Amino acid sequence: MKALVEATLVALVWLVVIPSASAQQWELRRLGFTQNFNAIHFPTKEHGWIVGDGGLILHTSDRGVSWQVQTSSVRTNLNDVFFINRRRGWIVGDGGVILMTTDGGQRWASVASVVEEDLYSVWFHNEKRGWIVGADGVILFTDDGGRSWTRQISGTDEYLYHLHFKTENLGWIVGSRGTILHTENGGRNWTKQSSGTQNDLFRVYFRDKKRGWITGSRGLILHTTDGGKTWIPLPSGAQQILLGVTFRKKEGWIVGWEGTILHSPDEGRTWRRVPAPTRERIYAIVMRDDREGFAIGRNGLMLVYRRP
């Protein structure tokens, strides 16, 4: 996904944007890395992980104040990370790479993969049951904590970029050329939902069983209030590729290429662009609470959000 997911810092930032009271606190921070940061995950308020190109894994135990390198034993690009608690986590990457840890990343073990395709997203419902998606319609499933994986039938050869489960059985996957897949039985069957677009879809997020959002190319935001039976495009005011999406309480955040940060104050009904101190590509965002968050991206980019 690195071909999808590359630029110069600027001092003046989006002066024409109408400001939002809660959305002007993003500050640039460099950690000294040049690798792309591809994904970030905080299972607790104190502990978080970032993964990136060239096998990079970073860990924080102090709410993101400092970050330390963890040894991955691989040199391939790592695309996603997910922890079910502070100690047990999984990472996926290019070439079918799957890593897992049971001790908070002190040791990362390579797991035998049943595929060679690039893997883009990993999600666990509990310590046993998890899913991975990737290129060429790959869906992998485990019920033993990630020690072994089997393929589920996706019914497509499109690239699958992201997945999100709301319950153990209820999940969604999005991918290239408008692909949306949905399961109500933990992936034993995946059915297609109509997106109404041929745009590539990169992230999916559900607040509950009915309300969900999808981000995609050309500034696309899709929204559903009926569990994906119908998806409606929302105005974004952007033309860039949109990637990470998250919510805290009534506030929503979306990030994308060219320093794009979108903010919603009304539970995702409306979105508008807010100031960002960069024109780099932003790949992922996490809000640890409604006052503090991180966005990461190309060339070791990190943005920190702190609300007074």
Image: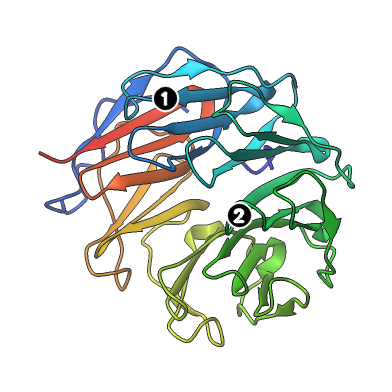
Quarter placement of the N terminus: top right
Q: Position of residue 161 (x, y in %)?
A: 66, 54
Amino acid tagged 1:
Thr
User: In the figure, is residue 6 to the left or right of 136?
Assistant: left
The reply to whether residue 86 is visible in this rendering is: yes
Give the distance between the C-alpha atoms of the residues marked 1 and 2, in whole angstroms: 21 Å
Residue name at image x 57 percent, y 31 percent: 51
Q: Which residue is mark 2?
A: 124
* Above or below, 49 relative to 161: above
| Residue at the top extreme, as displayed | 32
Q: Position of residue 110 (x, y in %)?
A: 78, 30
Q: Quadrant of residue 5?
A: top right
**Number of residues whose C-alpha sits closer than 10 Å to that of mark 2, classed few (under 14), some (14–19) or many (20 or more):** many
Quarter placement of the C terminus: top left
Looking at the rendered structure, the secondary structure element under dot 1 is strand
Residue name at image x 55 percent, y 81 percent: 228
Residue name at image x 70 percent, y 48 percent: 145
Q: Quadrant of residue 270?
A: bottom left
Looking at the rendered structure, the secondary structure element under dot 2 is strand
Residue name at image x 43 percent, y 83 percent: 225
**Front position in the image: 304 or 99:** 99
Q: Position of residue 69 (x, y in %)?
A: 54, 16
**Front position in the image: 125 or 69:** 125
Q: Which residue is mark 1?
A: 60
* Above or below, 273 relative to 48: below
* Contact? badges 1 and 2 (CB < 8 Å): no
User: In the figure, is residue 259 to the left or right of 188?
Assistant: left
N-terminal label among 1 and 2 = 1
Q: Quadrant of residue 113?
A: top right
Amino acid tagged 2:
Phe
